[in-house]
Image: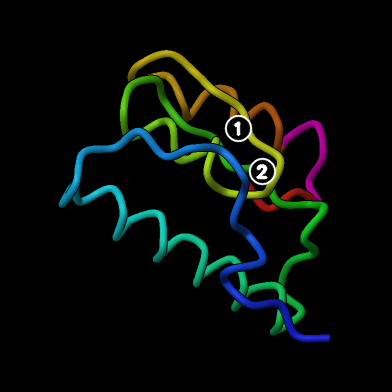
Amino acid sequence: MAVEWKDFNTYAENTWCVGCGNYGIERSAKLALAELVNEGRAKREEIVVVTGIGCHGKVADYVNANSFYALHGRTIAPATGMKIANPELGV
């Protein structure tokens, strides 16, 4: 069964301002994730979204996938650690 980008929606209330560019980034991320799953290049349960904190980081609340919040400018270290610990993850 094909995965649609809307399958990555959550029930979290979005708090971004009207017209914020984060909406486009969120939708693009969901489209990319759905494409990866549909092409067999990633399993949905093996995807981890790593974000910083702040408005843009809340994208993890709005994408139905495993996620991790890191401090400002520190997303690479935990993402690298996750990938080393479990090479099967799509980080």
Q: What amino acid is found at the position of numbered circle 2 in the picture? A: Val
- State which quadrant residue 58 falls in: top left
Task: Residue 14 in the image: state x and y as whole percent.
Answer: 42, 39
Distance in Å between CA atoms under marks 1 and 2: 11 Å
- State which quadrant residue 1 falls in: bottom right
Q: Do the residues labelled 1 and 2 touch (CB within 8 Å)?
A: no
In the rendered view, does 57 fall on the left or right side of 41? left
Tell me the SS state at disc 2. strand
In the rendered view, does 11 fall on the left or right side of 24? right
Q: Name the residue under label 2.
A: 48
Going from the N terminus, do you reach mark 1 or mark 2 first?
A: 2
Q: Magenta stretch: residue 25 in it?
A: no
Q: What amino acid is found at the position of numbered circle 1 in the picture? A: Thr
Task: Residue 68 in the image: state x and y as whole percent.
Answer: 61, 27
Q: Name the residue under label 1.
A: 80
At a point 62% along the width and 48% down the height, the residue shown is 10
Q: What stretch is highlighted in magenta?
A: 84-88
At a point 69% along the width and 84% down the height, the residue shown is 39
Task: Residue 16 in the image: state x and y as whole percent.
Answer: 29, 37
Q: What secondary structure is the stretch in magenta mostly built from?
A: loop
- Residue in the foreground of this view, choosing between 72 and 13: 13
